[in-house]
Amino acid sequence: MYQITRAKMLAKDIYLFDVKAQRIADNCLPGQFVIVRSDKDAERIPLTICDYSKEDGTITLVFQVVGAGSLKLSRLNEGDYINDVVGPLGCASKLCDTDIEELKNKSILFVAGGVGAAPVYPQVKWLYQHNIDCDVIIGAKTKELIILEQEMKKVAKNLYITTDDGSYQREGLVTKVIEDLVKNENKHYDLCVAIGPMIMMKFSCLTTKALSIPTIVSLNPIMVDGTGMCGACRVTVGGKVKFACVDGPEFDGHKVDFDEAMKRQQIYKTFEGRAYLKEKEGDTHHGGCGHCGGDF
């Protein structure tokens, strides 16, 4: 059992929990995630580790209510216990494996869409702790859905906020801000890290490719099982089959087949769709979800 030491609503249907999990806090790195189950009968939910403190023995989770499992989780309060928290899982951010001096010579841009600010934050904080500057763009539909603004201001060199409706700071999509920074404000970037909804990452990558900026994306949004068994997060990267939860979640954004991934997510939601994918994908399907007859 894992106690919630802080529970906070960040925006409508978006929650932040600090959870007591000493061993996870001692071993996790930016980019990794955990599998959470609010009680013994709840579904398993993969959640990115937004922050962690070895001193306090806590990890910070930020999640949006999108289904029954996350709704049940959102009803817990400070002092309550989460039944299961398993991790750290997935591969750490590629930045963590890069030479620090090399990173200091790079100009890095982070692009966060909506709840994507949660997995962006620990990477920006990690760079800040290593005396490496970076710029951050946070985008959301409206001002009320902007999260982690104050936290990000403390660790980013420059923070740019944009809203679709123009209700806060800049107006427009994150792609417009990327173009404005490069074309109109004479910014140069050696690397972009974009995290958010699939459609946002797709168009961010189209924008950065046109600007010749290498781009990393995190495919957290397509994960379901989180262990590589269900096959829901199967994706084609550079013509090769990958699974976001075990091979990622980070990939070269310019090599990800976003259209295939988004179409597959819609098909995967139905029994008939899963049967179709099983037949089409053969041995690479991974039917361990229990729906398709695969083995765990």
Image: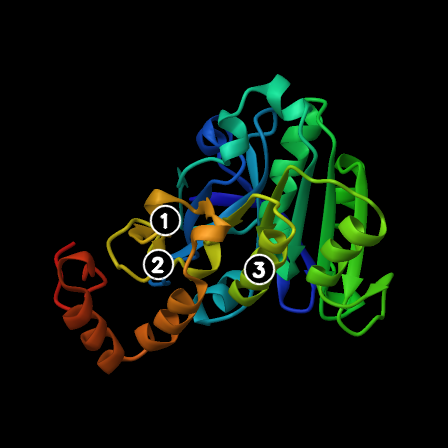
Distance between the alpha carbons at the discs numbered 2 and 1: 7 Å
Q: Is residue 120 above or below residue 140?
A: above
Say whether marks 3 and 2 touch (CB < 8 Å): no
- Contact between marks 2 and 1 (CB within 8 A): the answer is yes
Q: Which of labels 1 and 3 is toward the front? A: 3
Q: Earlier in the sequence, mark 2 or mark 1?
A: 2
- The amino acid on which the numbered mark 1 sits, given as a three-letter code, is Cys
Q: Position of residue 63 (x, y in %)?
A: 56, 58
Q: Earlier in the sequence, mark 1 or mark 3?
A: 3
- Three-letter code, disc 2: Cys
On screen, 34 above or below 58? below
Judging from the image, what secondary structure is the residue with disc 3 in?
helix
Q: Residues within 10 Å of mark 1 (few under 14, many from 20)?
A: many
* Residue 50 in view (yes/no): yes
Residue 133's image quarter? top right
**Residue identifier under label 2:** 233
| Residue beneath disc 3 | 206
Residue occupied by mark 1: 245
For the C terminus, the quadrant is bottom left
- Residue pictured at 41% horizontal, 37% vertical: 91
Describe the element under mark 1 as helix, strand or loop. helix
Task: Nearest to the eye among marks 3 and 2: give it.
Answer: 3
Horizontal side of 209 relative to 134 (left or right) equals left
Cα distance between the residues tagged 1 and 3:
24 Å
